Image (cartoon, coloured by chain):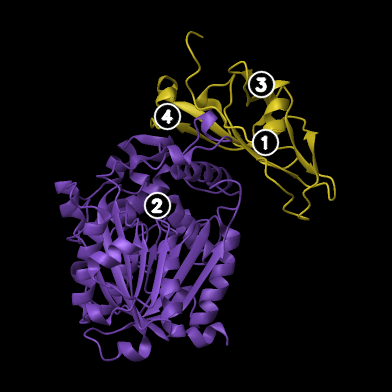
């Protein structure tokens, strides 16, 4: 790809840094409570089930199902203009949490709810890897 | 003290607004939220018969500074002041807060003022830098509309609904707006034209989205006792409820049904009425699927059956439950719930002319959102 990556990039806070470091290693890791085993995403400071602040970064399978999907026709981000119409999917991960992403390797008109998917890792800049999805085989 | 003690103790005694259609055509940069708020306040005061000096409480939303607003209105020493964020979910919250304010005696008469110059100010509800989110924006995901598109896609997958389902709502609300002189969009809409409107975020179309327009609304709240001697018949707050639906995203797996169920139980218990007693409903239609979710969430029809239930004119004027009789957010004006509160009051007073619901005695307001609110109002 020519030129600099122009799309929005995550703004990484200290709390969230381990998620993005794992992504860079092509791993999907989310927080798992050391006291009750609850897992959650997006990253936050504590466990909503037992209020513990003790957690580890737990590696997920990267598998899930499309809870729902949309196709953007409106230009909100100028950097996405050339990709319109582009898809956004909301994946229910096998381990529970809901994760926003894009699906690659499928035409927009073939996307369906409940389609099994798996994570793919896209190194968009030397520092940032985004987690997207492809249809699971 | 129980919630039932609160029933019928507070009344709306004045409503005022701008002409939304006129503002839409003029696009005047001098009409700031303050300028707009002033006009609605003046109109609401005239409507109530009260004098400015009678107002001892002020609540504002989407108006950046209550200090500036109060200064401009010459309300120097209010005993009650509150500012709420310019989010639509706050309109129902505003009425609740003002009602609690006068019920407790913290104020006698509260003016709730909302001013929105979203169109002139260039609001997009998606591209604003403050909406940035590390777990959505990098994928091109933004805007509350896209969250509703996700929920609607899932709804269509789980239940029997089609593109035409939302078209029924769009056509019905436009018909109502055609009878509303203040509405922005008054030209009748056909299903054919609806189905030709462009997608914003598939599966939602332009006509499934609320308008972006300028305007303002004010309502004036006081105790039932004080309300008796005023110019117009009071509109009483019979029941009210607010339930959060807090989650990582604006879209939720349940389409907010769980919060709505709790809110429904409270509001109907407090008011002592049920869905069958409601003469018309003013439902927060930021995006048209929300009307369907709300009808189901508040028990007007079973979950998943809204698409069939709304057919055959049931939700139109003359039908069993006219919904959004002013045209709502998609055809009248996007005043984030405030204008449809005013419509509820006017329906109960019998002031709605061509779009008047016959023998209108009980009206319900519903807003499903991360803070779901509802009220039941009576004349």
Q: Relative to the observer, which residue lies in front, B227 or A128?
A: A128
* Residues indicated by labels 3 and 4 sit on the same polypeptide chain: yes
Q: Nearer the viewer, mark 1 or mark 2?
A: 1
> Label 3: how many residues lie within 10 Å, few (<14), some (14-19) or many (20+)?
some
The x, y position of residue B338, in whole percent, is: 34, 63
Q: Earlier in the sequence, mark 4 or mark 1?
A: 1
Q: Is residue A51 left or right of residue A65?
A: right
The x, y position of residue B274, in whole percent, is: 49, 77
Q: Chain of mark 2?
A: B
Which quarter of the rendering shows the N terminus of chain B? bottom right
Q: Which residue is mark 3?
A: A121
Which chain is the one coloured yellow? A
- Residue sitting at x 27%, y 85%: B233
Q: Relative to the observer, which residue lies in front, B130 or B151?
A: B130
Real-space Cα distance between discs 4 and 2? 21 Å
Real-space Cα distance between discs 3 and 1? 22 Å
Identify the disc placed on residue A77: 4
Real-space Cα distance between discs 3 and 4? 22 Å
The x, y position of residue A75, in whole percent, is: 38, 30
Identify the disc placed on residue A14: 1
| Mark 3 residue element | strand
Q: Is residue B51 above or below residue B280?
A: below
Q: Is residue B246 above or below residue B377?
A: above
| Mark 2 residue element | loop
Q: Is residue B52 left or right of residue A62?
A: left
């Amino acid at each position: 790809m020519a030129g600099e990556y122009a799309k929005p990039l995550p703004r990484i806070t200290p709390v969230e840094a381990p998620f993005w470091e794992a992504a860079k290693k092509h791993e999907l890791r989310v927080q798992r409570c050391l006291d009750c085993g609850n897992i959650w995403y997006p990253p936050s400071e504590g466990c909503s089930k037992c209020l513990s602040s003790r957690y580890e970064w737990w590696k997920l399978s990267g598998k899930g199902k499309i809870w729902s999907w949309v196709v953007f026709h409106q230009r909100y981000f100028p950097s996405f203009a050339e990709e319109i119409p582009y898809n956004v999917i909301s994946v229910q991960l096998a381990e529970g949490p809901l994760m926003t992403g894009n699906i690659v390797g499928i035409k927009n008109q073939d996307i369906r709810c409940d389609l099994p998917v798996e994570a793919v890792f896209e190194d968009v800049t030397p520092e940032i890897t985004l987690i997207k999805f492809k249809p699971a085989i | 003290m129980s919630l039932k003690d609160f029933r019928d103790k507070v009344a709306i005694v004045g409503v005022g607004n701008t002409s939304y259609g006129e503002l839409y055509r003029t696009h005047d940069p001098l009409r700031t939220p303050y300028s707009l708020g002033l006009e609605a306040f003046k109109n609401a005061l005239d409507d109530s018969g009260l004098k400015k000096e009678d107002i001892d409480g002020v609540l504002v939303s989407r108006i950046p500074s209550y200090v500036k607003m109060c200064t401009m209105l010459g309300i120097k020493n209010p005993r009650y002041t509150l500012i709420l964020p310019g989010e639509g979910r706050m309109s129902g919250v505003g009425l609740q807060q003002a009602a609690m304010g006068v019920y407790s005696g913290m104020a006698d008469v509260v003016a709730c003022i909302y001013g929105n110059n979203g169109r002139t100010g260039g609001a997009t509800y998606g591209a604003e830098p403050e909406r940035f989110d590390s777990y959505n924006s990098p994928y091109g995901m933004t805007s509350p509309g896209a969250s509703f598109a996700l929920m609607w896609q899932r709804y269509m997958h789980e239940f029997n609904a089609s593109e035409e389902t939302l078209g029924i709502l769009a056509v019905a609300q436009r018909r109502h707006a055609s009878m509303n002189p203040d509405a922005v969009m008054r030209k009748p809409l056909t299903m054919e034209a609806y189905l030709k409107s462009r997608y914003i975020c598939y599966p939602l179309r332009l006509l499934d989205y609320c308008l972006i327009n300028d305007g303002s609304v004010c309502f004036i709240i006081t105790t039932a006792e004080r309300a008796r001697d005023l110019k117009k018949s009071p509109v009483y707050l019979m029941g009210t409820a607010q339930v959060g639906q807090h989650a990582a995203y604006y879209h939720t797996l349940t389409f907010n049904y769980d919060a709505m169920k709790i809110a429904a139980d409270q509001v109907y218990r407090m008011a002592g009425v049920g869905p069958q007693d409601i003469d018309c409903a003013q439902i927060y239609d930021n995006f048209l699927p929300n009307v369907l979710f709300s009808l189901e969430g508040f028990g007007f029809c079973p979950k998943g059956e809204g698409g069939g239930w709304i057919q055959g004119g049931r939700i139109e004027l003359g039908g069993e439950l006219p919904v959004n009789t002013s045209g709502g957010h998609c055809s009248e004006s996007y005043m984030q719930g405030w204008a449809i509160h005013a419509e509820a009051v006017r329906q109960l007073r019998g002031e709605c002319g061509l779009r008047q619901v016959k023998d209108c005695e009980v009206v319900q307001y519903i807003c499903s959102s991360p803070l779901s609110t509802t009220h039941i109002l009576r004349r």
